[in-house]
Image (tube, rainbow, N blue to C red):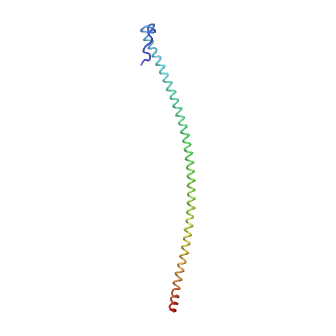
Amino acid sequence: MPVVQRIPRRLEELLGADGTDQFVDFLNGALQVHKEDIITTVVDKFERRVVAETSALRVQIAELRAEVKTKIAELRTEVKTEIAAVRTEMADKFEKVHREIGGIHAAIAGQTRWLVVLGLALVTLYPLINRLLEKLF
């Protein structure tokens, strides 16, 4: 599409019809080349800007990636420490429960011994007490 469609009348009178057409064609050609140069320049600047912004984004992404890796490592360490603490606490609690069970076991064993002794005593003493009572009554 031509950029220059009409030129001033005074200039048209000076150039004549053929000169006017040639001048308009010349201006349109020159403006088209200038337009293409401007578009090329703008596209180049845009591409450079896109490359620069992309590079900046990549740097930010790399920094964020490194920060996330660091935070994950810290979190892993913290979780491992907490798990170790819980394991130690559970081991202590299990040891305490084990000791209490041992105490209960010892008490039951003691009571069982007394029951066995009492049972044997009754088995042994019952006939004697029964004979004494028979003689008395």
Q: Is residue 43 above or below residue 4?
A: below
- Is 111 or 42 nearer to us in this picture? 111
Residue at position x 50%, y 25% from top? 42
The one nearer the camera, 131 or 91, is 131
Q: Position of residue 94 (x, y in %)?
A: 55, 63
**Above or below, comparing residue 24 to residue 100 in the picture:** above
Q: Which quadrant would residue 15 be assigned to in this image?
A: top left
Residue at the image point whose x is 52% and y is 30% from the top = 49
Instruction: Work out whether 8 lies above or below 97.
Output: above
Q: How many marks?
A: 0
* Viewer-side residue, 9 vs 28: 9
Front residue of 48/112: it is 112
In the current view of this chain or complex, which residue is farthest to the front? 137
Q: Is residue 15 left or right of residue 93?
A: left
Residue 69 in picture, x, y percent from top left: 55, 45
Rendered-image quadrant of the N terminus:
top left
Where, by quadrant of the figure, is residue 10 drawn?
top left
Q: At 56% from the left edge and 54% from the top edge, which residue is drawn?
A: 82
Which of the 4 quarters of the picture holds residue 90? bottom right
Q: Position of residue 31 (x, y in %)?
A: 47, 18
Residue at 52%, 87% in the rendered image = 129
